Image (cartoon, rainbow, N blue to C red):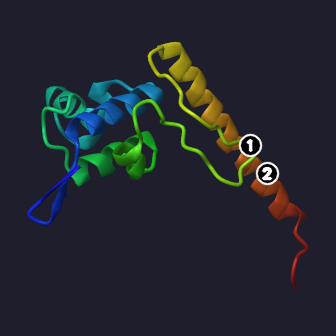
């Protein structure tokens, strides 16, 4: 990222790779994301290739469609998309290579399973709380 007249200019190529990475992890086609964002597929794939300036609005809409935190698109290195989570027994440390589509699907299923388990644990803990009258 670089500073220009007091504004931060985002690194288009890195963010573009992240857009493509998270789209593939969610098993979505570029056309599906483009339709949701309200642009053509060719215009969207230019964002993924880093050929067009990526706006916060585009990042927010893509993140919303893919159900991810928009900050991940901006901050995650393409080879480190699974972030370290402190104080979690389910933390995955280190990097994950994403060159294999099957591996991407397996990792996505793993992450979704971890989230599902955590949600179920929270529900069970909520049910076991003594009720206040």
What residue is shown at x 23% (from left), y 43% (from top)? 11
Furthest toward the left, the residue is: 5
- In the rendered image, which quarter is residue 66 located in? top left
Q: Nearer the viewer, residue 27 or 16?
A: 16
Label number found at residue 117 = 1
Q: Give the percent coordinates (x, y) of residue 38.
A: 21, 41
87 to 27, vertically: above or below: below
13 to 69, vertically: above or below: above
The C terminus lies in quadrant: bottom right
80 with respect to 130 (left or right): left
SS type, badge 2: helix
SS type, badge 1: helix
Q: Give the percent coordinates (x, y) of residue 69.
A: 44, 50
Q: Give the percent coordinates (x, y) of residue 30.
A: 29, 26
15 with respect to 87 (left or right): left
What residue is shown at x 20% (from left), y 50% (from top)? 55
Q: Identify the residue under disc 2.
A: 121
Label number found at residue 94 = none
1 with respect to 87 (left or right): left
Furthest toward the bottom, the residue is: 133
Q: Nearer the viewer, residue 62 or 20?
A: 20
How far apart in space, not on screen, are marks 2 and 1 (Cα)? 6 Å
Q: Nearer the viewer, residue 109 or 91?
A: 91
What residue is shown at x 25% (from left), y 31% (from top)? 48
34 with respect to 66 (left or right): left
How packed mark 2 is, by other alpha carbons closer than 10 Å (few <14, some 14-19, many 20 or more), is few
Q: Are marks 2 and 1 in contact (CB under 8 Å)?
A: yes
């Amino acid at each position: 990222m670089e500073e220009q007249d007091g504004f931060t200019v985002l690194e288009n190529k890195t963010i573009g790779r992240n857009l493509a990475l998270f789209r593939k992890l969610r098993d979505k086609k570029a056309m599906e994301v483009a339709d949701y964002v309200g642009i053509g597929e060719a215009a969207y794939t230019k964002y993924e290739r880093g050929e067009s300036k990526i706006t916060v609005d585009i990042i927010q809409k893509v993140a919303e469609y893919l159900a991810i935190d928009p900050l991940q698109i901006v901050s995650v290195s393409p080879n480190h998309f699974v972030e370290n989570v402190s104080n979690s027994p389910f933390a995955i440390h280190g990097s994950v290579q994403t060159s294999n589509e099957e591996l991407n699907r397996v990792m996505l299923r793993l992450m979704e399973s971890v989230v599902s388990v955590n949600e179920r644990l929270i529900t069970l803990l909520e049910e076991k709380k003594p009720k206040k009258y």
